[in-house]
Amino acid sequence: MARIDQFFRILHGLGGSDLHLSSGCAPMVRVHGTLQRLDHPALHDATLAAMLDEIIPPARRDEFAASGDLDFGYAVPDVARYRANFYRHERGVGAAFREIPSSIPSVEALGLPPLLRDLAMLPKGLVLLTGPTGSGKSTTLAAMIDHANTHRRDHIITIEDPVEFVHEPRGCLINQREVGRHTKSFAAALRGALREDPDIILVGEMRDLETISLALEAAETGHLVLSTVHTISAPKTIDRIVEVFPPEMQAQIRTSLSETLQAVISQVLFPRADRPGRVAALEIMLGVPAVRNLIRESKTYQLTSVLQTGKNAGMQTLDDDILRLLGAGLINPRDAAVHVADKPRFKPYLAGVNATAMGRPGSAADLADDDF
């Protein structure tokens, strides 16, 4: 057993999501969204470097030495799998680990709308999961892939950095490739995937122009492509993708997006107010004709209005879903206040909320005045 495994067992026992090890600091864990220090002495740089070296894949030691950054997957038997990121900083070395649940949760277990199951069954097109780091995008995608793996009879290829959830082939043939271990890059794996007879391609992240171009090409040529983008709303996702390309290509990319986009799901995680854990609020934009037209005409600033009027089609704004969670008593008003866009809309609602009952000190009037 590697010496570092003791920290993973502590993290797992606490029900935490992340472990942080940094030279000169005590180990820290994130539990239900909050960082906590462990009762452990600060880690000296030489000690931590030796601990990390024990679990670096031998073939990738030179990569970390040369670049100062490394991503890979690590498994602790009888505990869990972890997504590992090693890095160098002012005090020495550091590492962040995200725990990957041993079982893949279903869409229902995550409390997500059934629409996500339908998206996993689409024959072709582009489906994007967006949100900040740590918002649960990978878990949501894993649930969608698991649904497809159960209910379809197709070939699924995932390209990840690193592989997180491990899917056992059931109804589908599923092949998972890790950047840096099985393939050089997302773009190289995507080029190869187009010659490997896939029906569904999961791209862990659309990071650069080449990867985005190839993902759009795959969606245009009859494949279902699922991927993530680090944006905070559906309209901003469209702008981010288009702006990656040089100006002379942007009109073409807007046309391509308007023809291939099936959905953008923007996700934010909140600490639960009713019990330990976290719950997701979602913004949902579907590739309906009105959305496609606005993308093609470069009028993304009007997309929010379409989301507000498209509830019958299954669309919703993030504010709508946050309001739903507030009304159900699942999240705290102060947490909601950080993420809502239309703050005046929430002020009357929050002014009538009993803040103490929602698990936070202070009066309802304080909420209205301080946060809005």
Image (cartoon, helix red, strand yellow):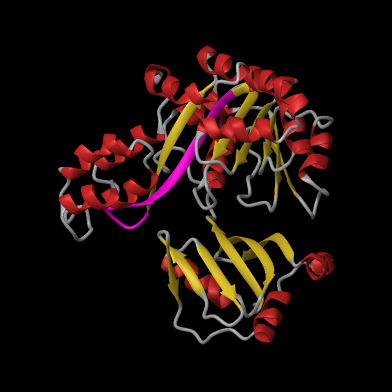
Quarter of the image containing the N terminus?
bottom right
Which percent across, then down, holds residue 248? 77, 25
Which percent across, then down, holds residue 71? 70, 59
Give me the residue at 63% from left, 49% from top: 166
Res 188 seen here:
yes
Which percent across, then down, holds residue 291? 53, 18
**Residue bounds of the magenta highlight:** 262-277
Res 314 seen here:
no
* Above or below, 55 relative to 50: above
* Above or below, 24 relative to 127: below
Q: Quadrant of residue 229?
A: top right
What secondary structure is the magenta-colored segment mainly? Answer: strand
Q: Nearer the viewer, residue 301 or 282?
A: 301
Please give left or right for residue 56 compared with residue 351 in the image: right
Please give left or right for residue 137 compared with residue 56 in the image: left
Which percent across, then down, holds residue 49? 70, 79
Please give left or right for residue 165 compared with residue 191 in the image: left
Q: Quadrant of residue 262?
A: top right
Give me the residue at 38% from left, 38% from top: 341
